[in-house]
Amino acid sequence: MKKLGLIFALAGSTALLAACGGEEAAGDEENGESGGTIQVGVANEEPYGYLDGDTVTGASPEIARAVFQKMGYDDIEGQVADFGALIPGLNSGNFDVVTAGMDIRAERCENGNFADIEMQYGEGIAVAAGNPHDLHSYEDIADNPDIRVAVMTGANQIPMLEALGAEQEQFVTANDIPSNLAAVESGEADVMVATDATVNSAVQNSGSDAVEFVEDFTQPVIDGEDQTAYGAVVFNYDEEGEELKEQYNEALQELKDSGELLEILEEFGFTEENLPPEDITTEDRCNVEES
C-alpha cells in the first residue's frame, strides 16, 4: 500500500472538509480492500503536529499516518485548527479524529473518546534572555502575582497553574505557540508555558536572542502528583467513533510491539523516555470505570 497522503486545510479556510461517515469510512483489511478517507483535526504545535510548507507533519500526524495505513485507509483529510477548537470541532462533525499529542485529562474525557496512550511528556518554559525574574518552575510563576504568563487557549497548563495558585489575571492567552512566544519577546508576557518539547522547539525555531529556554526547570507537582502528560488521539463517543477507536488501538499496539512507534517519535526529537508507560492506561487518566 502506498504511504498515506496527509491533505490538510489551513485554519480559517472558508471551505471546511465534510466529515466522512458510515460504512464508507471503515477500512477492510480482512478482505484486502483499502478504506476511504478519514477526517482529522490537528493543532499547529511543533513537534507534535505542524505545517512544513503545505505538508502537515510532526510526531502525532505521523503516528496517525502509520496507524491508519495499517487499518487500510488510503488518505487522511483534515484541518489545522486552534488547539482549543479541536474537541469542539470533533463533536460538531468537522472531523472524525483529533491527533495533537493531547493530554488525557478527566475533564476532556467527558467530551472526547481517547484512544490508548501513544506518548508521554513533561512541561517547560521560555523567558526573556537572562531570565530576569529567575523563573524555574510553575510554582515560581504562581507565587508571583505580577508575573504575566503566555499560554495557549485551552491548554492544560492553565488548570495546572491555577491549582498552584496562579490568578486568572496573570494569563495572556493566544491561539498558537508563535503568538505566545512573541508575547514574551515583546514584553507583553514574562514567561511562556507549554510542554518541554514545544517550548524548546519554538525557541530554537524563532532565531531570536530575546528569549531563552529554561534548562534547569523543575517539573510541577500538584497534590503530591507529578504532572507528566499522556498524549493520545481522540474519537467521538458514537458507535462509529468507538469502532474506529478499537481498530486504532489494535494497530497502535502493533507499532509499539514492532518498535516503529519509537522510530517515529525519535524523528521529532523524542526519546525512549517518551514512550507510553506500561502501568498507566487511558482509563486511569480519565478516572472512569470500564463499562
Image (spheres, rainbow, N blue to C red):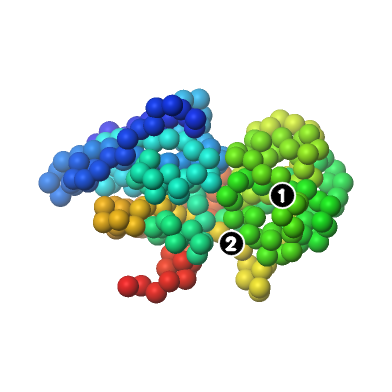
What residue is at 36 percent from the left and 72 percent from the top?
290
Where residue 5 appears, as percent x and y from the top left, is 34, 32
Instruction: Work out whether mark 2 precedes mark 1 in sequence or the reverse, and give the earlier one.
Output: 1
Using the image, determine if residue 17 lies above or below residue 157: above
Q: Residue furthest left?
A: 31
Picture quadrant where residue 158 is located: bottom right
- Element on which disc 2 rests: loop
Question: Closer to the camera: disc 2 or disc 1?
Answer: 1
- In the image, what residue occupies the spot 56% across and 40% down? 45
In the figure, 74 relative to 161: above or below?
above
- The reply to whether residue 219 is visible in this rendering is no
**Residue 106 in sight here:** yes
Neighbour tally class for label 2: few under 14, some 14-19, many 20 plus, Cα within 10 Å = some
Task: Check contact, mark 2 vs mark 1: CB within 8 A.
Answer: no
**Callout 1: SS:** strand
The residue beneath circle 1 is 171
Which numbered marker is on residue 228? 2
In percent of width and height, residue 26 lies at 22, 46
Tell me the amino acid under the disc marked 2. Answer: Thr
**Left-right relation of 281 to 17:** right
Residue at 68% from the left image edge and 40% from the top image edge: 180
Q: What is the spatial separation of the Cα atoms under label 2 and label 1, in whole angstroms?
A: 22 Å
Q: Which quarter of the figure is the C terminus placed in?
A: bottom left
* Residue drawn at (78%, 39%) of the image: 188
